[in-house]
Amino acid sequence: MIEMSNVSKQFDRFQALENVNLSIQKGSIYGLIGSNGAGKTTLIKLLAGIYRQDKGKISIDGKPVYENTSLKQNIFYIPDQPFVFSHYTTKQMARFYKSCYPSWSEERFEKLAKLFEVNLQKKIQTFSKGWQRQISFILALACNPEILILDEPLDGLDPVVRKKVKNLLIHDVAEREMTILISSHNLREVEDLCDHIGIIHKGSIIIEKELDELKSDTHKVQLAYRDTVPNKLLRSLKILHSEKRGSVSIFIVKGEEDSIAKQIRETNPVIFDILPLTLEEIFIYEMGDIGYAIKSVVV
Ligand SMILES: Nc1ncnc2c1ncn2[C@@H]1O[C@H](COP(=O)(O)OP(=O)(O)OP(=O)(O)O)[C@@H](O)[C@H]1O
């Protein structure tokens, strides 16, 4: 289990993370999402043991991460710009990782290289961006890490390769309980892959929940009345956002579905629908609720 408690990190006088608490269960796929500059990469680099926290504790299975070489042999981090030594071929990079990771599997490396049809003798830097990312996945998965940390993992991959990579990730989670932390702005992909979500904003985690719980807690409600929407109802619902489309009012409401539906039915609407939201919609409305709303796009 990965745990961060009251972690803070400052760069010069800028507070990049403040009192962050986070826990990731073994075998879970955790999606870290947030606004630009929220602190996602900083948090990832702390978890990967690249940065040292100023305050708080970061541990994996109870052991501190920073300067813990044996622990780091179980963690593989693919940054948004994958790392390669200049002039190295995939074969040479494989030899390097084999020397760093005791869990390296040559057999798996060969199988993955065949699956992705990669020329192992070609210098990695001469491959396209998407190909370089595929090579990172081959190398990462051949290391059989217990924890895989991914920053914008599927960026630049075509839809067929994306599917292939997602299947491989899910396979490793199911087969050997690998834990994955994904930071991404592609919320459809996060929704597709992750079982837990952390939303970070201005250096603080504002929500940390199971995806199903998060989705069952926010709803889109469509309503119409012969007259206007009763004030009593507007006061009793926790409304994150409202808009009007013709005679239909649309509300984004937080709370338990049955309780919301009961309160609405008591007011006899002529039209009433309650719909689930996508993660992208939940993110936008939650951020709006804390003052990070979409302003007019026309300037
Ligand atoms: N090495 C550094 N030195 C100084 N400031 C930094 C450093 N790394 C990050 N920051 C600052 O910390 C804040 C958080 O940056 P970080 O890269 O963690 O955000 P992010 O959530 O990954 O952003 P994005 O989604 O835009 O990639 C930013 O304001 C950034 O300028």
Image (tube, helix red, strand yellow):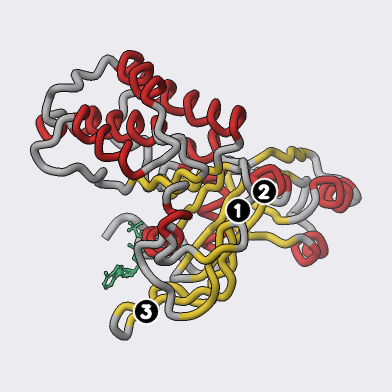
Rendered position, 175 above or below 269: above
Q: Which residue is mark 3?
A: 10
Q: Looking at the picture, how far across and down is residue 138, in whole percent?
A: 34, 29
Amino acid under label 3? Answer: Gln
Residue 188 lies left or right of residue 258; in this view the side is left
The image quadrant where one finds the N terminus is bottom right
Q: Residues within 10 Å of mark 3 (few under 14, many from 20)?
A: some
Q: Observer-nearest residue: 166 or 258?
A: 166
* Type of the residue with mark 2: Glu
Task: Residue 3: give x, y in percent of width and height.
Answer: 59, 62
Q: Is 236 left, or right, of 132 in this rendering?
A: right
Q: Which residue is at 30% across, 35% downward?
A: 136
Q: Is residue 174 left or right of residue 145?
A: right
Residue bearing the label numbered 2: 210
Q: Please tell me which residue lies in front, 139 or 238.
A: 139
Q: How many marks?
A: 3
- Disc 1 target residue: 24
Q: Quadrant of the C terminus?
A: bottom left
Q: Earlier in the sequence, mark 1 or mark 3?
A: 3
Name which residue lies at 53% across and 52% down. 283
Q: For the residue carrying disc 1, how many other residues have a C-alpha within 10 Å: few (<14), some (14-19), or many (20+)?
A: some
